[in-house]
Amino acid sequence: MPEKRDYYEVLGVQKGAPKDEIKNAYRKLALQYHPDRNKEAGAEDKFKEISEAYAVLSDDQKRTQYDNLGHAGFDQRYTSEDIFRGADFDTIFRDMGFGDFFRTIFGGGFSNGYDGRRRGQDLAFDLEITLEEAAKGTEREVEIPRTEQCDVCNGSGARPGTQVKTCPQCNGAGRVQNMHKVGFATYMQVVACPTCKGRGKLIESPCNSCHGSGLMRKRRKITVKIPPGIDEGFQLRLRGEGEMTTSGTEPGDLYVIVHVKQHTQFIREGDDLWHITMISYPQAALGAEISVPTLDGPTTVKVHAGIQVGEVITLRGKGMPRFRGYGRGDLLIRVGISVPQKLTSNQKALLEQLAKEFGTDTNKGRKFRL
């Protein structure tokens, strides 16, 4: 598989380009490479490439993750379907007269327009976990309000004991085809049937519980499995756990957006963790063995004599597990020296004696030339 080009390069814009500039760049390229207009070899592949770039750069969250992770990290987190999900192509193609051709190229799940399967809407849920849970992985039970099939009519929408009729306009397909002209070209657009509202059936005696919709709101408990090494902002996709629609159709998906609480002792940087430890001047000068925290519990670290402020001690393999990979990152211990604010008379005398040994008498003023 050839290496993907940078999305900004694909659209011909700078990295900090505003959304309007990105949209205008995509519109111009779409007119040039759309297969309805460009029959040259490779035009369709080029159209797919620019559309993928626009789907990412027009979405604030996806764009931020792409900017931070690059192609390699971003492609590990998003499937092709995830990349195109939610992208607003309808407003662009509506003015250009391309109808449903975009959905035909990329498959049924990417278009914001009518989809013959009448797939249920996706849901999003924000879940906060601790750094320890992110490191080890965990399971959480969440309660999601969503649309499900009516228990009384089993999703048919009809009062129990009554019949459901097939829509005469669409013959049960739930969709109809409209033809319209743009200039010298004629385009076909598939839309929901206006008579049955895309259901393919007509209900003469609606269910009293759901009022003919076949659906009702419920709260559903779902167990979410958090894999080890997950990072802030990652989305977990639970297929089929989103909104349901009419009987016999596909439900949407549930996207669980993971947020990791700020830790009191560690700062995360990718797979590595940072910790600041304070030691005394004698420990820094003479060396010592100190206890530092890790995700696996406290461990002993040797501080060499003469260590300086800001030096870093690296504990290999004591960081975060690599998400969907092997091994762990490192724990980086940055050393600081704690200066006491109060001294006993004996401590003060000893420090003054030490200052004389170093030739820095604290009782004499020192002059510095700037």
Image (spheres, rainbow, N blue to C red):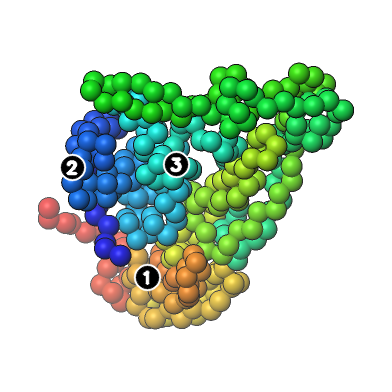
What amino acid type is highlighted by mark number 3? Phe
Name the quadrant containing residue 91.
Answer: top left
User: Gap in Å between the C-alphas at discs 3 and 2?
Assistant: 24 Å
| Residue 210 left/right relative to 315 | right
Mark with earlier residue (3, 2) = 2
Residue at 31% over, 25% down: 186
User: Gap in Å between the C-alphas at discs 3 and 1?
Assistant: 48 Å
Residue at 39% over, 23% down: 179
Q: Where is residue 309 in the image (x, y as percent from the top left)?
A: 35, 66
Residue at 59% over, 45% down: 253
Q: Do the residues labelled 1 and 2 touch (CB within 8 Å)?
A: no
Q: How crowded is mark 3: few (under 14 residues within 10 Å), some or many (20 or more)?
A: many
Q: Which mark is residue 12?
A: 2
Mark with earlier residue (1, 2) = 2
Circle 3 is placed at which residue position?
110
Query: Quadrant of the image for the N terminus?
Result: bottom left
Q: How crowded is mark 1: few (under 14 residues within 10 Å), some or many (20 or more)?
A: some
Circle 1 is placed at which residue position?
312
What amino acid type is highlighted by mark number 2? Gly
* Residue 300 in view here: yes
Residue at 35% over, 69% down: 311
Q: Residue 142 carries which label?
A: none
Q: Where is residue 262 in the image (x, y as percent from the top left)?
A: 53, 51
In this view, 147 is above or below 66: above
Mark with earlier residue (3, 1) = 3
Q: Where is residue 92 in the image (x, y as percent from the top left)?
A: 32, 28
